[in-house]
Structures are given as structure tokens and as C-alpha cells.
Image (tube, helix red, strand yellow):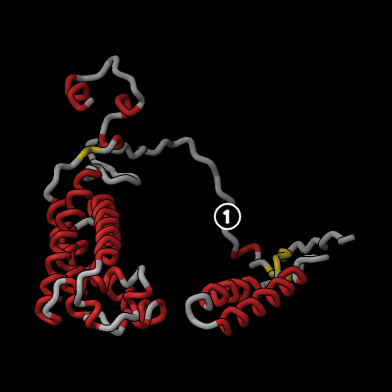
């Protein structure tokens, strides 16, 4: 049965600092990292997590570990807050100052994201096929290389086989490329309105370079055979081509005003008593 803490007039009783939660998080990370690296990482992570869990529970059970934190002298402490009868001006979204809260005032329709994904995906496919013709004299090489991300048989196949048409590989590559293009196009439609300036520059160059760097850093661990066969210069060029074309298509599409740009009466569904300009906005 725990005993109540003593009262300290010039100090407070606070939970004692502990490193066990951080070590437990590191253990969980190593457990999952071992699934794509080596079983030793999983074993080390499991041992570290169990040890941290035991240490964490012992620091709170049966009694919580605490420490005494001294307070500042009374003369150095902040004065108590006092109430005021004055009112403050509330920010109104869509008002004269055009205050924005959480959502952008205008967004692109989802259809623009689908169009951008389709057009950008077509440009990326053309650049990939051009690479296949110039590097391997076969448009099927990049297609089979993409399918190899989901087909282990193609990932370890010789180059001569990758240069030949493979019906299963073509279907798999088409599905993977189409779904990824549509998904990224939808993400662009949602993200571009939130970028303050130069949306095409950030969405068409900066974003492709970032995810290309992530793929470059992780593919050697996830699929070393596929990593050895990718020409990273052409890979980055195709990603940038997709980003630029998709960004231009989406940026030039119409914009839809969000509800927060409308008067409060319209957002609340109240139509009576609106001015002419408010009725037009509704």
C-alpha cells in the first residue's frame, strides 16, 4: 500500500526522469528493422524492449519514483493572472482581412489530381521507354524492371530476359505504375494549394528529388538485386518529368473555394437576412 507524498511548501514532487521509454521505442524499431535487414537486429530489439519494459514498470510500480524539484523564491515567481473585462477582436475567416485558419481558402478539385496523375504518368512512361531504347535497345527493359519490384523472378532474371516482352510483367508494371501515378496525382491536388509560393517548383522538382533520395537510400536494403540494375540518373529524370507535368496540369486547373471563405451565415445554412453579395456567394 503506497504512502502519500509529503507536502513541501517550497518544492513540488515530480515524476523522476527515466530513460526506459526511449530504450523501449528503440527496441521496437530494431524489431521491425530486422524484418528487412537481419534477424540479429530483431533479436537485439526484442531483448532491449523486454528489458526496457521491465525497467519501466519497476520505476512506477509498486510506487512511482519521484524527485523533489525546488521552487523559485516567492519574489522571483510570476504574479498571479488577473481577469479583465475588456473584449478582444475575433478573427473571422473570409472577412476583410482574409484571415485563414486551417484549410486553404481555395483548393483544386480531385479530378484535377487524377488528370495530373494520368498525364504525368504518361510522360514518365515515355521517358522510361526512351531510356530502355538508348541504354538496352529495348522498351521492355524498364517495364520489366518496374514489374520486378513485385515479381522476385524478374528481379533476379538476366538482362537478356528483361529485354524481352513478358505478358505478366507488362500487366503488373501497368497496374503498379497506374495506381502510383493516380495516388501521387491526388496527393499533388491536395498539397499544392498549401504551398505558399512556386507550387510547380516545389511540387515538380523538390518533391521528386526528395522521394527519389528516399528510394535510393532504402532500395539497397529492401531489394538489392533491383537496386543494382536501376540507372538512377534516368530514374530521377523520369520522376522530375512526372512532377513537372502533373504540377502544371493541376496548378492550371480551376480552384474551388472552401467553406471557410464564405460568410458564417452561409456556412451555418442560414439564408434569411443575407445581403446580395452574400446570396451570390451562396
The quadrant in which residue 183 appears is bottom left
Q: Residue at x 74, y 68 (%)?
A: 57
Note whether 147 is above or below 274 in the view shown: below
Image quarter (top left, top right, bottom left or bottom right) of the C terminus? top left
Q: Quadrant of the N terminus?
A: bottom right
The quadrant holding residue 238 is bottom left
Between 73 and 71, which is closer to the camera in this rendering? 71
Q: Position of residue 235 (x, y in %)?
A: 21, 74
Q: Nearer the viewer, residue 132 or 262?
A: 132
Q: Tell me: 274 left or right of 245.
A: right
Residue at image x 80%, y 61%?
7
Question: Residue at label 1?
Answer: 79
Q: Position of residue 219 (x, y in %)?
A: 36, 77
Badge 1 crowding class, 10 Å Cα cut-off, few under 14, some 14 to 19, many 20 or more, is few
In x, y percent, where is residue 254? 14, 42
Residue 16 appears left or right of 135 = right
Which element carries disc 1, helix, strand or loop?
Answer: loop
The total number of labels drawn is 1
Residue at screen point 33% across, 20% down? 270
Residue pictured at 65% horizontal, 62% vertical: 74
In the image as oriented, which residue stretches furthest toward the right?
1
Looking at this view, name the residue that lies furthest to the top.
Answer: 272
- x and y percentages locating residue 211 in the rendered image: 29, 70
Amino acid at each position: 500500500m503506497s504512502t502519500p507524498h509529503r507536502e513541501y511548501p517550497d518544492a513540488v514532487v515530480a515524476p523522476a526522469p527515466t530513460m526506459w521509454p526511449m530504450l523501449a521505442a528503440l527496441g521496437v524499431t530494431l524489431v521491425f528493422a530486422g524484418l528487412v535487414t537481419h534477424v540479429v537486429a530483431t533479436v537485439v530489439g526484442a531483448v532491449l524492449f523486454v528489458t526496457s519494459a521491465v525497467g519501466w514498470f519497476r520505476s512506477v510500480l509498486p510506487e512511482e519514483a519521484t524527485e523533489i524539484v525546488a521552487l523559485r523564491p516567492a519574489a522571483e515567481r510570476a504574479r498571479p493572472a488577473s481577469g479583465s473585462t475588456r473584449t478582444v477582436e475575433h478573427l473571422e475567416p473570409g472577412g476583410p482581412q482574409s484571415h485563414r485558419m486551417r484549410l486553404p481558402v481555395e483548393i483544386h478539385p480531385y479530378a484535377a489530381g487524377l488528370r495530373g496523375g494520368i498525364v504525368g504518368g504518361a510522360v514518365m512512361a515515355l521517358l522510361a521507354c526512351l531510356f530502355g531504347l538508348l541504354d538496352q535497345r529495348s522498351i521492355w527493359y524498364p517495364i520489366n524492371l518496374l514489374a520486378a519490384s513485385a515479381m522476385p523472378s524478374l528481379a533476379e532474371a538476366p538482362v537478356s530476359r528483361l529485354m524481352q516482352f513478358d505478358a505478366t510483367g507488362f500487366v503488373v508494371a501497368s497496374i503498379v505504375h497506374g495506381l502510383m501515378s493516380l495516388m501521387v496525382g491526388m496527393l499533388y491536388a491536395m498539397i499544392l494549394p498549401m504551398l505558399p509560393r512556386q507550387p510547380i517548383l516545389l511540387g515538380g522538382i523538390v518533391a521528386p528529388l526528395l522521394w527519389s533520395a528516399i528510394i535510393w537510400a532504402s532500395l539497397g536494403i529492401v531489394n538489392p538485386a533491383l537496386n543494382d540494375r536501376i540507372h538512377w540518373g534516368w530514374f530521377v529524370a523520369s520522376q522530375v518529368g512526372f512532377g513537372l507535368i502533373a504540377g502544371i496540369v493541376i496548378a492550371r486547373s480551376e480552384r474551388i473555394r472552401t467553406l471557410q471563405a464564405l460568410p458564417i451565415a452561409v456556412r451555418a445554412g442560414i439564408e434569411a437576412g443575407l445581403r446580395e453579395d452574400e446570396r451570390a456567394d451562396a
